[in-house]
Image (tube, rainbow, N blue to C red):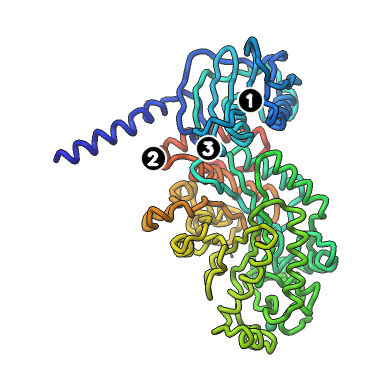
Amino acid sequence: MKNSDCILFLVFLLAYVPDMQAQNTGNVHIIPKPLELTLTNGAFEIAPNTRILVSPDAEQVGMYLQQLLEPPTGYMLRVDVLQDELSLENTIVLELDPTAAQHGEEGYALSASPDAVVISARTAAGLFYGVQTLRQLLPPQVEERSAVAGVTWEVPGVEITDRPRFPWRGMHLDVGRHMFPVEFVKKYIDLLALHKMNTFHWHLTEDQGWRIEIKKYPLLTEIGSRRAATPFPSDRNRLDGQPYGGYYTQLEVREVVAYAQERFITVVPEIEMPGHSVAALASYPELGCTGGPYQVRQYWGIAKDVYCAGNEKVYAFLEDVLGEVMELFPSVFIHIGGDECPKDRWEECEKCQAMIAKEGLADEHELQSYFVTRMEKFLNSHGRRMIGWDEILEGGLAPNAAVMSWRGMEGGIEAATMGHDVVMTPTSHCYLDYYQSQNREEEPPAIGGFLPLEKVYSLEPVPAELPADKTRHILGAQGNLWTEYIPTASQAEYMAFPRASALAEVVWTTPGMREYGDFIERLPSLLKHLDGLGVNYRPLLK
Ligand code: ACM
Ligand code: ZN
């Protein structure tokens, strides 16, 4: 070995050996893997008279913990505001320390000893993630929603310090192709919380269905939420003849957003434009280039009919829609789709061609860029930021837009290099609608592809070729659940889990500590929690 190699080797040992020891964690199995975890002696036992002590600004987290523990234990633990306690014996402490900079925005420390469990963090979100770790430290029966007899509610002695790698840890759900009840959306959000994910991307409008009530345009749901038929999952070229529909009222949307907020999850709404908009055109045909008539689309795939980019009415309509959407969703980011917008109609449309001439645009790609940039200005003027699929790069990216890179990592690399924020969702690693096995006949019909658990786990969201000063633009990554071939909640669970569990570790855990074999060893413990929650995940040995 050269001297320099020796030094490198020593640095490697110093850097990794303490971690390796920390990974000797007996049967304490947490997903996503915490940054530092050490086993200590003894255990804490939750008893009927255990108290939850909470810093004044974190009572929400205290109540969440109380409500998590009450059904399975049968104990309604007292929640008190943390004051200058004489003794912390028999308490679970949730302590905010705004000066604890080492925890960042979402990190925490958790210490469990026979006396007390103490979770400390700089923010309430950090405390919430500490509570999620506590949940995984408890017996999996903690997930049961009715009293479980004969369980000792024991937390092993541990010292944990933990914080996430990325600020965007997301899962997406397409409710356009198939509709999912509010109860399932909440369950999905709960599962994200268990995995310390913080972003729920709700894909609300599609060619095949408009799923959000907009007060100013009632036909969007009266007409746009219903289609006459759906392709058979087993034969995508044949329709089932069964009318299909549904939508979320604004009241339901508010309920979901509030539910997510209690779990420190931001709901990012997606309103698709200029493509994937046939359901809106069926409702208001004057918004299309030809004026229709249009039908809510029944087949999957990409439609040629899109919003007319040369018609002022379209911009006014979309601003009205986004106005109501911003009222409902406090998310800074609003997703405007932007993917898969064929230019056929624009090429033939007088209004679109007139807009190209008036604005001095080179072609229809620049017209799409004009469209997106105009919508971005509107969002920015309301203090929001735009995010869109990577096609929004075509014809020039809107000045402040963030990009969701799905056709690979390239769009993300291009955007980040230009200084734009990026969320990585490449089909290669993040499309959870793809098959999980090469034995397709043993799986429910899926859209295609092959994305096994290990491949999801191998995603590295920060591309090696990205210059070091641009890596901060990679906000994180997200799993996408498109539902053309996912007609039921139970199948959505089957496709999402445990692949979303793998992705949760990708976006949370420090890269040097990620190892697939180790993940697979920890996974059965998490799956027991999913059993308790009644999740129809895909079994490991199928
Ligand atoms: C997409 O999958 N069309 C974003
Ligand atoms: Zn047009």
Residue drawn at x 63%, y 39% is 193
Q: Amino acid at mark 3?
A: Gly
Q: Amino acid at mark 1?
A: Leu
Quadrant of the image where one finds ligand 1: bottom right
Marks 3 and 2, how far apart at CA = 20 Å
**Residue in the foreground of this view, choosing between 198 and 481:** 198
Q: Residue under circle 2?
A: 512
Q: Amino acid at mark 2?
A: Gly
- Could you tell me which secondary element the residue under label 2 belongs to? helix
Marks 1 and 2, how far apart at CA = 29 Å
- Could you tell me which secondary element the residue under label 3 belongs to? loop
Mark closer to the chain start, 1 or 3: 1
Q: Residue under circle 3?
A: 104
Q: Residue under circle 1?
A: 94
Marks 1 and 3, how far apart at CA = 16 Å
* 492, above or below 33, in the image: below
**Residue in the foreground of this view, choosing between 478 and 109:** 109
